Amino acid sequence: MKKIIAFTAIRSEYDLLSNLYKMLNNDKEIDLRLIVSGAHLSKTYGYSVKDIEKDGLKIFAKIETLLDSDTKASRLKSASILLQNSIDLIANFEPDLILFAGDREEVMIASLIGGYLEIPTIHFFGGDHVKDSHIDNPIRHATSKLSTIHFVSMQEHFDRLVKMGESNERVFNIGSVALDKFNIEPILSKEALHKIFYIEKNFEKFALVIFHPIPKERGKSGIIFENILLSLKNKNINAFVSYPNIDPGNKDIIEVIQKYQNDTNFIFYKNQPRNIFLNIYRNSMFIIGNSSSGIGESASIPIPAINVGYRQTGRKPNDNVIFSDINIDNISNNIELVLSKEFQDKLKGIKNIYGDGFSSERAYKLIKNNNFKEFIFKDEDILEMI
């Protein structure tokens, strides 16, 4: 029996690996258990642990780490709580492997624990790079240096990790596991969505809004978010609008949501079941905001993506992505651009550069057929590799 621990702290990151988790969980020779923390356990942010339970996965521990705070120190304090409460649990369980994805503080904690306890770790989505000033970017790279094995989304990410001193043998280009859900989740019609949300009129056409705060836009996040809503409202475009993540500055965005809570142009939500969210996504005219999903996933539908502001700048975009300034005029002009016939024609036959939607199977086979213990000790010298 191969024992595996996976760390998860927020719905968006959980959904990246959920299909792989199900594959591992269905294997009788694998004992997969999840350490659940962060926003998953917060009713303010949708209490998405219920989605994990609905998927039938084993929860090894629920660790409450999220502070009701909007400060720069809050995420660091949350990380320290996760570290202190995970070490003995993992040491006593003695897993054969630890999995984690992305660039939030939880992956740093998981990689630290794996390194010190000499447990092989696999980091998903390493080698990516963003120029938006967010702490997540150096956290991602630091985690890569602490991790044993890397499952990356594209050749550029593979090459970046190798240039960072990771040996070729540690890096596997499997494509983005985030794309598999578009091949798996059942399709719902707009009419079905209307019934779910009790929509009697409007919303025949709508956009999807996902916007999160970053330090470079501190003090402006609420203004930018409101500019997005006003640009849509001025064009009489309805939208499903997500609550922000837990990063500092989210309260400014939530205040704007409360201001427009009763506006019939918008439906605001904290968390939606995966299938409902994906069908909102599939049926949207475009996605707008600053989510990494717009950069790396929207081309798999395909729909246009408008990225507003600094967040996600530097990431390699698909051809369906437009980067926009934060003022209303520029946002409005870009909405017109992506809805134009010329832009819509560009979407025909587009292939997502991040993968083909079958990456979970590749990851599963690699995990199933390897123990990776020979890679635990990282003694490579980058000077000898150049």
Image: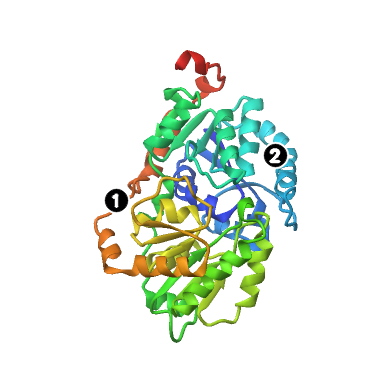
Above or below, 316 against 197 in this view is: above
Three-letter code, disc 1: Lys
Q: Quadrant of residue 200?
A: bottom left
Q: Return the x and y of residue 368 as percentages of the image width and height.
A: 43, 33
Q: Are marks 1 and 2 in contact (CB under 8 Å)?
A: no
Is residue 159 visible to us here? yes
Instruction: Report helix, strand or loop for mark 2.
Output: helix
| C-alpha gap between disc 1 and disc 2 | 40 Å
Q: Residue furthest top?
A: 384
Question: Image point 57% across, 43% down: which residue?
Answer: 103
Q: Is residue 94 visible?
A: no
Q: Is residue 382 left or right of residue 177?
A: right
Q: Position of residue 301 (x, y in %)?
A: 34, 59
On the image, numbered disc 2 is attached to which residue? 86
Label 1: how many Cα within 10 Å (few below 14, some 14–19, many 20+): some
In the picture shown, does residue 362 fall above or below 11? above
Q: Nearest the camera: 232 or 373?
A: 232
Secondary structure found at label 1: loop
Q: Count neighbours of disc 2 (C-alpha within 10 A) and say few if under 14, some if 14 to 19, many if 20 or more.
A: some
Front label number (1 vs 2):
1
Figure check: 142 above or below 32: above
Q: Quadrant of residue 82?
A: top right
Tell me the amino acid under the disc marked 2.
Answer: Ser
Of all residues shown, which one is farthest toward the bottom? 200
Residue 206 sits above or below residue 30 on the image: below
Q: Position of residue 354 (x, y in %)?
A: 37, 45
For label 1, the residue is 351
Q: Quadrant of residue 98?
A: top right
